Image (spheres, rainbow, N blue to C red):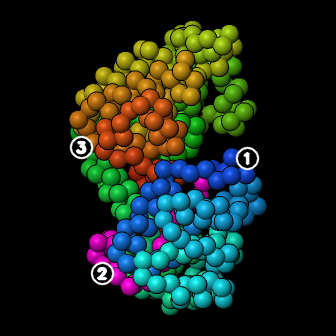
Amino acid sequence: MKTIKDYELASKKVLLRVDFNSPIVEGKIELNDRFMAHVETIKKLVEQKARVTVMAHQGRPGDDDFTSLEQHAELLNKQVKARFIKDVIGDKAVKAIKSLKDGEVLLLDNVRSLKQEFKPSTSNKMVKTLAPLFDLYVNDAFSVSHRSQTSVVSFPKVMPSCAGPVMEREVNAIRKIHEFKEPSVFVLGGEKPEDSKVVIKELGDKVTRILTCGIFGQFCLLSKGFNFGAQNKYITEELGYSKDKELAKLLDDNIKTPVDFGVKAKNERKDLLLSDFPVNYEIFDIGPETIERYCKIIKKASSIFMKGTPGYSEDEKFALGTKKILKTIADSDSFSVIGGGHTRAAIDRFGISEEKFSHLSLSGGALMKFIAGKELPGVEVLK
């Protein structure tokens, strides 16, 4: 897979796909780590005197967070000078692209405002209009590379293409995890059992130990028939997950589930063993015995992948599992990849240096598919 280091970029017209998709709070776009990582890519291209046109999206048509990229342009301009055009493939966009000079940046509007974005083809109007205007296509958006959409998969088929720095770092880190240097450990938590199940299904026999926690750890136990009491109702009714017999069959001796939990009792933490359940309390963290067992395994690991937090770490009372596990990984000499927005936020909250980890992923669904060994269309097309 070629990268921008393989090209002479001075005076070249570059079409750059990034992922500026951001949280919207009270109508305002919030700056995030992924946004800033793409800003660094843009700055690199500007330093090399490329003529940069940026493609990005926000939300999906019909969703509340589907908006123009006008606010994104304002945030971008605080980091690097860039023009914004409220157009993607119309006359205004074409004229603006053609008028770019060396080292200048243009941000097009939301690519998902075009129907052609969802009908990938080398002959659709989006490709026919934009491809002839550029010398190079760069995909820096690993986080959307699991989607077969025009801005991700069609341009590389008709023009010189390569990976941007964000894409390159993500791919290289996960490929290193895939070496499965023994002993390898995966810590799977968070609130999306379906993502973690795919990893177990595809990699369960390759990873030395898989440590389940968070909602996923609870779901594993529930699928094996364990009755938590109130937490069963929360998982099945509020989250909408039902017992998974297939998952239960996948849970062998290498896949560890929690042996105790921290529950909320009268707004205080109370640690309970599995034998204490069922109870009318909801679970907010793994318990001290589980933390000790998991940390002992992590300390012996040569490579570690962690996605999702073990508990509700935003509340100090229930941050113990997340804090102890992250600090144990940080203090180890292992190669470590950390994924998930909540996990990354926890690292900041606990004041753990990001440099203590080998790689902090900026992706979600794409990361879990790639870690599970699935091919990502946006990555494959760059090979």
**Amino acid type of the residue tagged 2 in the rendering:** Glu
The residue that appears at 69% across and 19% down in the rendered structure is: 230
Of the image marks 3 and 1, the number of the one nearer the N terminus: 1
**Amino acid type of the residue tagged 1 in the rendering:** Glu
Using a 10 Å C-alpha cutoff, classify the residue at mark 3 as few (fewer than 14 neighbours), some (14 to 19) or many (20 or more). some
| Residue 317 higher or lower than 198, as above or below | above
Per the model, the C-alpha gap separating discs 1 and 2 is 43 Å
Q: Horizontal and vertical percent for residue 223?
A: 58, 30
**Amino acid type of the residue tagged 3 in the rendering:** Lys
Residue where numbered disc 1 is placed: 26
Using a 10 Å C-alpha cutoff, classify the residue at mark 1 as few (fewer than 14 neighbours), some (14 to 19) or many (20 or more). few
Q: Is residue 3 magenta?
A: yes
Using a 10 Å C-alpha cutoff, classify the residue at mark 2 as few (fewer than 14 neighbours), some (14 to 19) or many (20 or more). few
The residue that appears at 55% across and 64% down in the rendered structure is: 77
Residue where numbered disc 2 is placed: 8
Most common secondary structure along the magenta stretch: loop
The label shown at residue 181 is: 3
Q: Horizontal and vertical percent for residue 347?
A: 44, 35
Question: Viewer-proximal residue, 275 or 353?
Answer: 353
User: In the rendered structure, which segment of residues is drawn in magenta?
Assistant: 1-22
Per the model, the C-alpha gap separating discs 3 and 1 is 45 Å
The residue that appears at 68% across and 36% down in the rendered structure is: 239
Front position among marks 3 and 2 = 2
